[in-house]
Amino acid sequence: MQNKILKDLLVIELASVLAGPTVGMFFAELGARVIKIENPKTGGDITRQWKLPSEKEEEQSAYYSSCNYGKEVVFLDVGKDRKALLEWIEKADILIHNFKFGDAEKFELSYEHLKAINPSLIYASLTGFGENSERIAYDVVLQAESGFMGMNGLPDDPPVKMPVALIDILSAHQLKEGILLALYQRAKTGKGADITCSLFDAAVGSLANQATNWLMAKHIPQRMGSLHPNIAPYGEQFVCADGKRVVLAIGSDRQFEQLLQLLQLQHLLLEEKYATNKKRVENRLELAQHLEKGINAWERATFIQACIQAKIPAGAIRNMKEVFELPDAEALILEEGGTKRPKTVSFKIR
């Protein structure tokens, strides 16, 4: 079974908040034994305190629950209870941490210290701005510094952060990939590895076409809401007859033709200003006005179903309740002791 594929691994997690614990949860979902070490002097992982106003004091916070499924939690002072910690590390396959600058050396928990007692240990660490930076890094700071906030939002409004701590998630994926490569290497050589990933590097490495638009074309991405700088209509939103919203993602001339046929706007195909994607980008505002008149007449569910049948990329803009009413989303929910969260492992191996 997929969820037992890593059942022979022992993972020690000395990480808090989201990025590091997300890596630990990934291994827990795949069957590894994950021991999460929390500091009793501070009340454990800080996200235990990050509660919504509606959450009860005695309940485990939803934020903490989001990335701490399937782990054995141990409250341990790494300074005073060093012997117990080292006994686990001696047997561990993987250690994950996001220590503040200098703490790994302070507590003698650096890779150089630990490989002496466990040469096959895969030592994985997360930093904010690199190994030599003392700067405190929370996700919104990284979104600001890496350019994500600067290009996110509406043209006449201030920059906006993404509502998920996406830089944490992206860096967690990077670290997971590094660990898996180190496991592959260890299977051949028997040697451990020292892996580090900074949130800043993960963020910049994820800028994709927005980065190359600058690096190659000297185009600084502007705040465009949901619109795409290279494609139209892509990201345009429309309100349907029932007041519910949809978004389009038309990536080819063929898809554009199918959309116009569905909306009975075929006459627009004869207009030169909509003949190519480049021209549609130039004239996207006027084009959206035409599309709005066509889409306004449809109920959302009917419009989306018609788009699916015609192979037109379009989506219903759903709130969280609506998302988890979808059978495919509901099937991803993991439950544990009265807590719920979606799986972080969304692939299948057959």
Image (cartoon, rainbow, N blue to C red):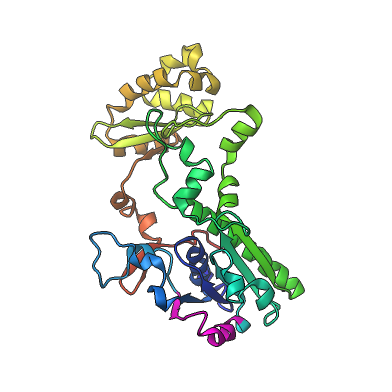
- Quarter holding residue 328: bottom left
207 over 4 or under it: above or below: above
Q: Residue furthest right?
A: 189
- Where residue 350 appears, as percent x and y from the top left, is 57, 64
261 over 112 or under it: above or below: above
Q: Residue furthest top?
A: 271
Q: Which residues are magenta?
A: 71-89
Would you say residue 77 sits in the magenta stretch?
Answer: yes
Q: Is residue 262 left or right of residue 128?
A: left
Would you say residue 147 sits in the magenta stretch?
Answer: no
Q: Looking at the image, which is closer to me, 177 or 275?
A: 177
295 over 135 or under it: above or below: above
- Look at the image and tell me whether residue 284 can be seen: yes
- Where residue 52 appears, as percent x and y from the top left, is 28, 59
| Residue visible at 57% across and 59% down in the picture | 127
- Look at the image and tell me whether residue 334 can be seen: no
- Where residue 269 appears, as percent x and y from the top left, is 47, 16
| Residue visible at 60% across and 75% down in the picture | 109
| Residue visible at 33% across and 55% down in the picture | 324
- Quarter holding residue 159: top left
| Residue visible at 69% across and 69% down in the picture | 193
Q: Is residue 223 left or right of residue 54?
A: right
- Where residue 34 appears, as percent x and y from the top left, is 51, 76
Q: Looking at the image, which is closer to me, 288 or 138?
A: 138
320 over 32 or under it: above or below: above
